[in-house]
Amino acid sequence: EKGIWVSYKDGVYDITQFVANHPGGKDKIMLAAGKAIDPFWRIYQQHTGRGNAVELLESMRIGDLSDPPTADSTSCPYNTDPERHPALIFHNNKPCNAELPAELMLDSWLTPNPVWFIRHHHPVPCIDPQQYRLCVDGVGTKSVTLCLEDIKSRFLKREVVTTIQCGGNRRSELDQIEKTSGIPWGFGAMSTAKFGGVYLREVLQHCAGLSHENVEAFEVK
């Protein structure tokens, strides 16, 4: 009665002692307390992709379901993910995590979009440009809602060239010294691009009425 149980496929598991050590935090895993974790793992498929989570869960098994649920392959949240370039080096497919191959890294200063490294924890969101809304609200500002056309037409487009690197880049080399936890990236978990958009500062100042005085008065960060 005091334990925390979950089910997965046809098994029942007592995860009471594991909750505090869950890498994703206690709050996340408690969402599945007393329920099936299958729907959660359909989103966080790294649990099954690497296998270590399944092995750990199996060590907590305390029983079997008399009437296990039937798997529904049509409900996979990754079904709408875009196609990826075959030249990428894939570590996972659901969610997709892939790195730029060494052979293409120095071909161009700006990494071509199709072979940009991919780091995901979730499915790629499906966004309808016509339905997109940016809502600004909070201390020191006035509430404002902007559509995508508002953002494009009312603000100057700014561009910046930057390189982005995953914090786990070259983890596979660390694994040679001592086994770590996470995707065994080579050195291709980094790419360079020219990004375009508007300054958040200008949106806050010109639409939400955030002033330098309000920043200081309300200690806005």
Image: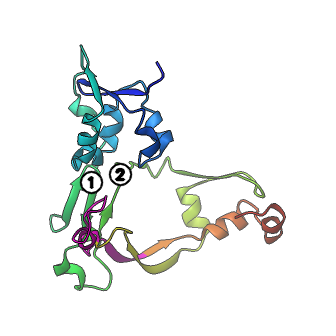
Q: Is 93 located above or below residue 161 in the figure?
A: above
Q: Is 8 located above or below residue 130 in the figure?
A: above
- Numbered label tally: 2
| Residue in the image at 42% along x and 36% along y | 17
- Identify the magenta region: 171-194
Q: Secondary structure at mark 2?
A: loop
- State the CA–CA distance, disc 2 to disc 1: 8 Å
Q: Reading the chain from its start, which is encountered first: label 2 or label 1?
A: 1
| Residue in the image at 24% along x and 14% along y | 67
Give residue 24's position: percent from left, percent from top.
Answer: 43, 48
150 or 67, which lies in front?
Answer: 67
Residue linked to disc 1: 82
69 or 158, which lies in front?
Answer: 69
Give residue 58's position: percent from left, percent from top.
Answer: 25, 35
Q: Which residue type carries mark 2? A: Val
| Residue in the image at 23% along x and 50% along y | 50
Labels 2 and 1 touching (C-beta < 8 A): yes
Instruction: Please tell me the numbered disc located at residue 124.
Output: 2
| Residue in the image at 34% along x and 32% along y | 37
**178 inside magenta stretch:** yes
Residue 80 appears in view: no
Q: Secondary structure at mark 1?
A: loop
Residue placed furthest toward the top: 66
**126 inside magenta stretch:** no
Give residue 163's position: percent from left, percent from top.
Answer: 40, 78
Q: Which residue type carries mark 1? A: Pro
